[in-house]
Image (tube, helix red, strand yellow):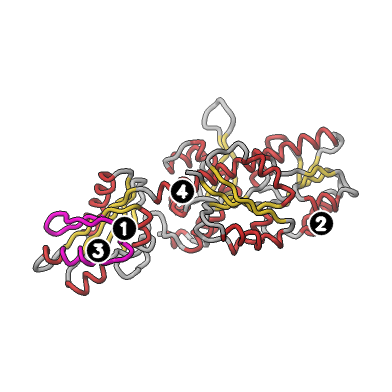
Amino acid sequence: MSVVIGVLVHARHQEVFRQAASTVSGVTLRWAVCGEPAHAGDRLRELLTSPGVNGLLIGPRSYEAVRGQVPEELPVAVTRPSSLELALAVARMRNDYPEHRRASIDTFDHHVIQEVATTLGVRHSALPYATDQPIAEIVAHHRAALRNGGVVITPRLEVAEALRAEAPVVDTDLLAASVRAELQDLLLRVRAGQAEDRRFAAGVFQVRDGEDVERARAGLREILLQDPQLAGSWVENRGKRGLVLFAHKALLEGATAGWQVVPGLQQAESSMDVRIAAGFGLGVSVRAGIALAERAAVRAEAEPHSCGFVIQDSGVIIGPIGGAGRRTEFAYRDHSAELERMAREVGLSPTTLSRLVSLERELRGRAVSPSELATLLGITDPSGRRLIRKLGTAELVTSEGSAQPTRRGRPTRLYRLRVGEALGQSGTALD
């Protein structure tokens, strides 16, 4: 099934975006082209009124203009110039202006500038990308940095035009390869989200006490069957005091308000005066989902009050959750509104950011390599490197030097996580 991606792009970059998408299969693009960032809001609304848009690919300046209008649940990829663009710009600088050894660079992400400048041995001053950065401020930075000579490297057309008469300028532009990489990453996230929603989920409900547990089970079954949010699920008896519920993950996640409420729990307690233990399991098969749900129900039965737990096959455990909307205590961290917002901007899932917050607490400020981060998260080394790049773009890691794990090979860079710090969470608050 084709994924539908909305593309909000400046007219200047339209051809690059089309070239990038020409070799990507399994995607349908809906275009919205604007001449100025001020028009981006109107173009975005046109995109969102068309049905079936699964994700949004957008440039940084357009995103600054519309970020408050992008639906929270819509996956977004923001294209920015990458290491490849900057490395090519440095090569042009050395070819066109060999007498200059210093560069003044703007708009590239901080980790991109550090990586390229260190690798290629470029003396430089930098003004990394920041939201709502005035053109006049960028021009002033270059003028101050170039008092002793040098070359301006900028992806901003307005900056290049303002300084071209005063200093050598190398203007850069987005390459199709960089846009394609962001598009492919966005497609993977959309498809992963779609597959996640279609994963199998099971719920196990156990009547813990009461004079007539079979009658209480029948009453609980009727409560669940009458719940409109569970209309697409299947409920069966399981033993004398239990029920099992089958559904897709998306349905059950909605019925539990994002794993914060156990359906029917409060009504069963108040109408039948019994305690209920509920367990939800998310697995790749019916058997796996039921097994995880049973483990979660056993954990809920160990609590003194009616509650539920959720166990996913990824190892995430959520609970205890009650019947009145009480805030969930996540094993890694609760998905606060701030964390959800940050996840959308960075292009990661809230669960991944939650795990990073927990890992940051455990590391206590210790820097790790991309490979070690991958090991700690249970992902591949390439995924670990991609994750570091995303976190670096969002300034959620800081470079802390390098290490030489073996006598042979290049040193590996070390990074310190700053996700919890960016969320304004102290180590105490995470416990």
How many residues crowd around disc 2 within 10 Å: few (fewer than 14), some, or many (20 or more)? few
The residue wearing badge 3 is 225
User: Does the magenta-highlighted stretch encompass residue 271?
Assistant: no
The residue wearing badge 4 is 363
Question: What is the magenta range?
Answer: 218-245
Q: Which of the two labelled residues, at mark 4 and mark 2, occupies the earlier sequence position? A: 2
At which x and y percent is residue 232? 31, 58
Q: Which of the two labelled residues, at mark 1 and mark 2, occupies the earlier sequence position? A: 2
Q: Which of the two labelled residues, at mark 3 and mark 2, occupies the earlier sequence position? A: 2
How many residues crowd around disc 4 within 10 Å: few (fewer than 14), some, or many (20 or more)? few
Q: Which of the two labelled residues, at mark 1 and mark 4, occupies the earlier sequence position? A: 1
Q: Which of the two labelled residues, at mark 4 and mark 3, occupies the earlier sequence position? A: 3
Rounded to the nearest whole Å, what is the CA distance between mark 1 and mark 4? 43 Å
The residue wearing badge 1 is 232
Tell me the amino acid under the disc marked 3: Leu
Q: Nearer the viewer, mark 3 or mark 2?
A: 3
Q: What is the quadrant of residue 275 in the picture?
A: bottom left
Q: Residue at x 24, y 63 (%)?
A: 225
Rounded to the nearest whole Å, what is the CA distance between mark 3 and mark 1? 10 Å
At which x and y percent is residue 132? 69, 60
Q: Look at the image and tell me whether residue 210 can be seen.
A: yes
The reply, left or right, for residue 338 in relation to residue 196 is right
Say if 404 sits above or below 124 in the image: above
User: Does the magenta-highlighted stretch encompass residue 240?
Assistant: yes
Q: Residue at x 36, y 50 (%)?
A: 316
How many residues crowd around disc 1 within 10 Å: few (fewer than 14), some, or many (20 or more)? few
Rounded to the nearest whole Å, what is the CA distance between mark 4 and mark 3? 46 Å
Q: Are marks 1 and 4 in contact (CB under 8 Å)?
A: no
Element assignment for label 3: helix
The residue wearing badge 2 is 140
Q: Nearer the viewer, mark 4 or mark 2?
A: 2
Rounded to the nearest whole Å, what is the CA distance between mark 1 and mark 2? 61 Å
